[in-house]
């Protein structure tokens, strides 16, 4: 850790999703204080949300790291599932920051994974992580995030990806019916279209159509709460179907990345499902991989239950960035 730089005061870290903007001040290495979640929809611009948070805390910061749900490349940031759009350099200057590091939110989540202890994780099924192998991260929230992290040359390297936008792969007749339902409105159906919080009402509508059932259109929270309480068979089937679909996505990520270090499940939806997820078809589907079934069966799958994990990852990436900068300055 680059502890000396904390003499500059606290650092700002944020995890910006399509619905929730989470902020914290890192006051010492790994020490996150004043954690707050703001609703993205309450702020016209991204910088308004940061200003509001800093005002609430009465804090002045010089260095910040923002983990955000979109591809990160050049200076221009455009969110995939929200309408915020900004220039990194203009935002840095407007906020009076010395450093504004912007990274993909799932890259930050992936960077956090190696630091998570057993009390922030719930294993689903068997398998044993292979030391030194790639770790995969998959998470359903407002969108569907995918990333990887691996260790070489004595440091962690994250792999940014937009793997949530791969084409949805149906694995049985029911999922084929869901896909056909979606094709009425979308010529490309991504995995994210269905395997995400907003995807749950779409699965529900598709299954109602498939079963010729008259069902009201319901929001994600209502479908999930009825499924967990087991008071509505169609909601229950919707959540069963969602968990199985997530198993397919995780299985595809495992073979794509050779993620023998494990697949970690993040995002806002699954940690809310508790035991339902552990008992669901997720793991069975994960291992249902044709000639690679035995390969996937050896890979552990774990739900990240620790709160705000991407904030810790953003803090670690900022620390490494600043350490790299000071090393470059010394060179
Ligand atoms: N009770 C609930 N159970 C399960 N899912 C829910 C519930 N309430 C809301 N959701 C879903 O969770 C999503 C928010 O998840 P999360 O907190 O991961 O969002 P986010 O970080 O803004 O998203 P992302 O990073 O994917 O853009 C909402 O879009 C909603 O669909």
Image (cartoon, rainbow, N blue to C red):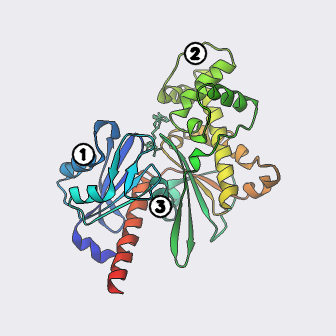
Q: Mark 1 points at which residue?
A: 48
Q: Of all residues shown, which one is farthest toward the bottom?
A: 331
Whether pointer 3 and pointer 2 mark residues with C-beta atoms closer than 8 Å, the reply is: no
Pick the residue in front: 192 or 174: 192
Horizontal and vertical percent position of residue 89: 30, 60
Q: Residue at x 27, y 46 (%)?
A: 49
Q: What element carries label 1?
A: helix
Crowdedness near tag 3: few (<14), some (14–19) or many (≥20) residues, C-alpha within 10 Å: many
Report the mark closest to the observer, 2 or 1.
1
Which of pointers 2 and 1 lies earlier in the amino acid sequence? 1
Task: Tell me: residue 178, above or below residue 121.
Answer: above
Q: Residue at position x 55%, y 51% from top?
A: 162
Instruction: Tell me where residue 210 sits by quadrant.
Output: top right
Contact (Cβ within 8 Å) of mark 2 with mark 1 = no
Left or right side of 70 for 199:
right
Mark 3–mark 2 distance (CA, rounded to whole Å): 41 Å
How crowded pointer 1 is (Cα within 10 Å; few <14, some 14-19, many 20+) is rated as few
The answer for how far apart the CA atoms under marks 1 and 3 are is 27 Å
- Can you tell which quarter of the image residue 5 is in? bottom left
Q: Nearer the viewer, residue 195 or 32?
A: 195
- The N terminus is located in which quarter? bottom left
In terms of sequence position, does the residue under pointer 3 or pointer 2 come before the other? 3
């Amino acid at each position: 850790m680059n502890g000396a730089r904390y003499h500059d005061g606290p650092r700002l870290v944020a995890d910006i999703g399509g619905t929730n903007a989470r902020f914290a001040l890192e006051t010492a290495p790994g020490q996150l204080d004043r954690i707050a979640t703001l609703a993205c929809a309450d702020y016209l611009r991204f910088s308004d949300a940061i200003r509001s948070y800093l005002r609430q805390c009465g804090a002045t910061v010089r260095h910040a790291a923002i983990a955000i749900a979109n591809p990160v490349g050049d200076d221009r940031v455009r969110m995939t599932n929200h309408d915020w759009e900004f220039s990194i350099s203009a935002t840095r200057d407007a906020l009076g920051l010395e450093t504004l590091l912007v990274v993909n939110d799932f890259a930050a989540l992936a960077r956090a994974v190696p630091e998570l202890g057993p009390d922030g994780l719930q294993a689903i099924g068997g398998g044993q992580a292979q030391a030194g192998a790639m770790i995969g991260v998959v998470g359903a929230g407002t969108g569907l995030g995918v990333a990887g992290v691996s260790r070489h040359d004595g440091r962690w390297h994250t792999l940014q990806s937009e793997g949530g936008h791969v084409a949805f792969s149906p694995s049985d007749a029911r999922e084929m019916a869901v896909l056909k339902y979606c094709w009425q409105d979308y010529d490309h159906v991504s995995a994210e279209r269905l395997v995400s919080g907003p995807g749950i009402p779409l699965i529900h509508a598709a299954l109602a159509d498939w079963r010729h059932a008259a069902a009201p259109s319901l929001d994600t929270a209502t479908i999930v709460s009825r499924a967990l309480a087991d008071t509505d068979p169609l909601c229950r089937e919707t959540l069963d179907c969602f968990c199985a679909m997530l198993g397919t996505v995780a299985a595809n990520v495992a073979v794509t990345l050779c993620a023998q270090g494990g697949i970690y499940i993040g995002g806002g939806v699954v940690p809310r499902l508790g035991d339902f997820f552990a008992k669901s078809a997720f793991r069975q589907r994960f291992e249902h991989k044709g000639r690679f079934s035995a390969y996937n069966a050896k890979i552990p799958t774990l739900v990240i239950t620790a709160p705000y994990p991407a904030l810790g990852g953003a803090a670690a990436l900022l620390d490494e960035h600043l350490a790299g900068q000071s090393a470059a300055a010394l060179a």
